[in-house]
Image (cartoon, coloured by chain):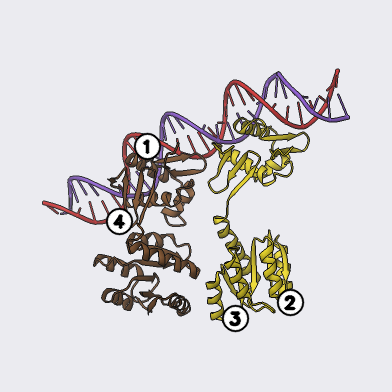
Chain colours: A brown, B yellow, C purple, D red
DNA sequence: GGACAGATGTAAGCTTTTTGTCAGGTAGGG
DNA sequence: CCCTACCTGACAAAAAGCTTACATCTGTCC
């Protein structure tokens, strides 16, 4: 299986290449953005591991260009630790998964496998809980098998709740996930956001656990 | 929190033990591979700090054996400086993190905390005593396997009692735990709080030991 | 350019829940 | 029996969350 690694830090790159090779992948390593973009555009890889901070051409730009050209190859982006904005932008730009540096190699391998499996169609990219389900590849939301139009921010909100569907997510946490990390929120934007979502998804789609946070509706096996 | 340190160099070991103890961990120190393996296999530690260059039994072998036996306790390995191969092998063998010698103590502590935190996420987060159990991840309370709704303050109160289920917790102590900062209490808010909890959890859920404090109900092995 | 539509942030007023306080009442231990 | 520690119910204050209206900002279309 051929993989493309776009990473300028030689130490990190060496480590990743070593691990991936050991795991049986054939890795092409590019050190700058232009080369990486060109390789991805003209060669055929099973997946790409893309550092966002590349010289010559930014990782995000590369990703957007590929997507614009219809290349929907699985991409895992590497971001600096705690850089929420980048992460959000990356996912928006069409990344399939992300990893914050520093990360552990087993985690990269696991995510790689997951992304490849998902892409191969063996596992679906659909998360569901109760009547709600989301397609993380198409970024669509369904309620009772009916497509519902949601805005980008709304989608991310549902996705966060979905990924934590077994517990309540506090407003603070949601804020961190949805906005840049240092966003000082002295307003009630999350409440408004949830209100708007409820209007679209149904009154009971998101339940409030006062003082704890919000939680997506569960299957009612009551 | 019990830790296992497997390290043959007496100087380094002394240093690490001193620091870890200072940080509040209880450290068991083993000087050779066989002893370390045996301890990890038969005792219960929260995490292991494992030097790879051990006499009698190599660190990597120990780690692989543990993993083969399904012991997925968090392990931080210590490797010689710049020894990439060892590092890679270690991660492959199932280590959770690594440190290259020489390292600084704060870094070890930080990684230890990180590993423990990560591990806590997957460990069973349920505490129980008598008919009451709480899920520390979902922040839910069950009585006889029935979900009971509690407020945030009530939840924290149960959690404190639960974490000290083997003894009585005084009103003063509870106040300090629940109101963190300004615990100047001239009212009976704790009594009221406990009263409200009893109403929800059952009359006998919390027992009063007059003059000593409150204690969560135990299994009745009368 | 300018009108328009969609997405999102802010503000204010309102509802509901949680928590603190108080004023008695109860009961265990000496 | 009596003191003190603890319990209870009622009420009020405070906090959390909901809803509606409106302001901004962006991009699109003519």
Residue at (57% x, 69% y) in the render: B95
Q: Residues within 10 Å of mark 1 (few under 14, many from 20)?
A: few
At mark 3, the secondary structure is: loop
Circle nearer the viewer, 4 or 2: 4
Mark 1–mark 3 distance (CA, rounded to whole Å): 58 Å
Q: Are marks 1 and 4 in contact (CB under 8 Å)?
A: no
| Residue placed under numbered mark 3 in the picture | B81
At mark 1, the secondary structure is: loop
**Closest to the observer: B145 or B215?**
B145
Q: Where, quadrant-wise, is the C terminus of chain A in this rendering? A: top left
- Residue at the front extreme? B69
Chain label for disc 3: B
Chain label for disc 4: A
Q: Earlier in the sequence, mark 3 or mark 2?
A: 2
Are the numbered discs 1 and 2 placed on the same chain, yes or no? no
Mark 1–mark 2 distance (CA, rounded to whole Å): 64 Å
Mark 1–mark 4 distance (CA, rounded to whole Å): 25 Å
| Residue placed under numbered mark 1 in the picture | A203
* B31 sits to left or right of A56: right
What percent of the width, then of the height, locates residue B102? 64, 78
Asked whether the viewer can see residue B179, the reply is no
Q: Residues within 10 Å of mark 2 (few under 14, many from 20)?
A: few
When the figure is inspected, residue A167 is found, relative to residue B217, above or below; the finding is: below
Are the numbered discs 1 and 3 placed on the same chain, yes or no? no
Asked whether the viewer can see residue B108, the reply is yes
Residue at (45% x, 62% y) in the render: A83
| Residue placed under numbered mark 2 in the picture | B11
Circle nearer the viewer, 3 or 4: 4
Q: Are marks 3 and 2 in contact (CB under 8 Å)?
A: no
Are the numbered discs 4 and 2 placed on the same chain, yes or no? no
Mark 3–mark 4 distance (CA, rounded to whole Å): 46 Å
């Amino acid at each position: 299986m051929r993989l493309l690694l776009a990473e300028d830090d030689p130490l990190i790159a060496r480590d990743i290449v070593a691990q991936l090779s050991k795991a049986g992948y054939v890795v092409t390593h590019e050190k700058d953005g232009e080369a990486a973009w060109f390789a991805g555009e003209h060669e055929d890889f099973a997946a790409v591991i893309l550092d966002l901070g590349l010289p010559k051409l930014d990782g995000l730009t590369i990703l957007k260009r590929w997507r614009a050209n219809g290349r929907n190859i699985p991409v895992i982006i590497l971001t600096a630790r705690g850089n929420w904005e980048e992460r959000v932008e990356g996912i928006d730009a069409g990344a399939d998964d992300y990893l914050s540096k520093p990360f552990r190699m087993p985690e990269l391998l696991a995510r790689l496998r997951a992304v490849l499996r998902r892409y191969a169609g063996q596992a679906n990219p659909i998360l569901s809980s109760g009547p709600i389900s989301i397609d993380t590849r198409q970024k669509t939301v369904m309620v009772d098998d009916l497509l519902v139009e949601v805005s980008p921010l709304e989608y991310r909100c549902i996705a966060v709740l979905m990924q934590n569907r077994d517990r309540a997510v506090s407003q603070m946490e949601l804020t961190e996930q949805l906005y840049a990390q240092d966003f000082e929120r002295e307003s009630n934007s999350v409440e408004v956001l949830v209100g708007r979502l409820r209007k679209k998804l149904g009154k009971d789609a998101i339940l409030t656990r006062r003082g704890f946070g919000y939680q997506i509706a569960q299957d009612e096996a009551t």
